[in-house]
Amino acid sequence: MASKKLILVVGPTAVGKTDYCIDLALSHSSPIISCDSRQIYREMTIGTAVPSPEQLAAVKHYFIQDHSIFEAYSAGRYAVEAGALVDKLFSEGHDTLIMTGGSGFFIQAFENGLDDFPEADPELRKTLTERLKNEGVEALRCELKLLDPESYETIDIANGQRVVRALEVCLQTGRKFSSFKTSPSIKRDYDIEKIGLIRPREELYRRADLRVLDMMEQGLEKEARRLHPHKDLPALQSVGYKELFDYFDGVPDPLNETGLTGIDRAVNLIQRNTRRYIKRQLTWFLRDKNIKWHEM
């Protein structure tokens, strides 16, 4: 058995990963390697719940706001860069390293690598992107459900570009998009121990709702207005931003079951979509039998 160990802490949004991992990292004299597909972008701060300046000062963090929304970034690229960083840190004398995140696809890419995805078909991509604009993301997700139920259950509904990519791969290759997520594990000279943080579902939802309100108090609307000119970038197809972009653009919500309007409706939608994202995260992580669950 390898003498070096990477502790990989996973769990849904709002479960408390940041504080838990800071304490864990301090106990092991380790930095923290973030595995979050949105906190990696420097232009997004409030809506991605990056660690506070005090938390960043307490422990060295990697992959926090060190890339731009204007550059393409993928799970495959993260797997390469994070793998190289982990090897480097172990070579410098660390015996234990802490990695944490809630982005299941990034985590799986790091653990197992990815099969080679096909090159994008420009015409098919254009057609699906036009459908996204005209029909909305839910119409594409329903089509994806027929072709790849697993991806339908786990892909973020607010991330239209990811839905487009998954459907594109299915239509282009005749294979499920989810089938590209499983490849033989990479051989490593260190052990990986996975810890999952969990709370009762209703408590998670309550914490998430309160966090959205806290983000609004911190200035999420102002941050979203600054990013609004770039709303079509893949990085910004995220819960917390897309709902506000729709509010700025006057996009109607045909269901509007709450009867709320304006900014109140946008905040309510962010809370609702965050809860839905938490549910998808739990679906993803609970399938992994190697995770040791820790009740918070």
Image: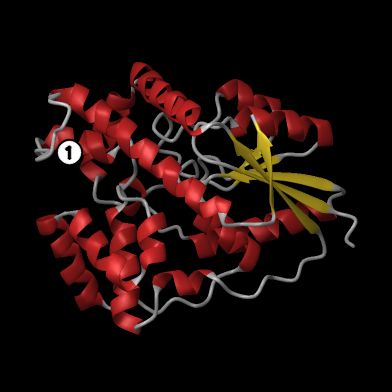
Residue drawn at x 28%, y 64% as measured from the top left: 164
Residue 153 image position (x, y, % from top left): 38, 57
Quarter of the rendering containing residue 140: bottom left
Residue 67 visible to an observer of this rendering = no
Q: In this rendering, is residue 128 above or below 261? A: below
Residue 190 image position (x, y, % from top left): 81, 59
Residue drawn at x 16%, y 54% as measured from the top left: 136
Q: In this rendering, is residue 1 above or below 240? A: below
Residue drawn at x 69%, y 70% as measured from the top left: 186
Q: Quadrant of the C terminus?
A: top right
Kind of residue at disc 1: Asp
Q: In this rendering, is residue 8 above or below 180? A: above
Could you tell whether 41 is left or right of 15 in the image?
left
Between residues 54 and 12, which one lies in front from this camera angle?
12
Q: In this rendering, is residue 164 above or below 90? A: below
Q: Quadrant of the N terminus?
A: bottom right
Residue drawn at x 20%, y 77% as measured from the top left: 123
Could you tell whether 250 is left or right of 190 in the image?
left
Rate crowding at label 1 as few (under 14), some (14 to 19) or many (20 or more) other CA atoms within 10 Å: some
Residue 4 visible to an observer of this rendering = yes
Could you tell whether 181 is left or right of 62 in the image?
left
Quarter of the rendering containing residue 100: top right
Name the residue that disc number 1 marks.
246
Residue 179 image position (x, y, % from top left): 47, 74
* Count of numbered marks: 1
Between residues 68 and 129, which one lies in front from this camera angle?
129
Residue 92 image position (x, y, % from top left): 84, 50
Q: Secondary structure at mark 1?
A: helix
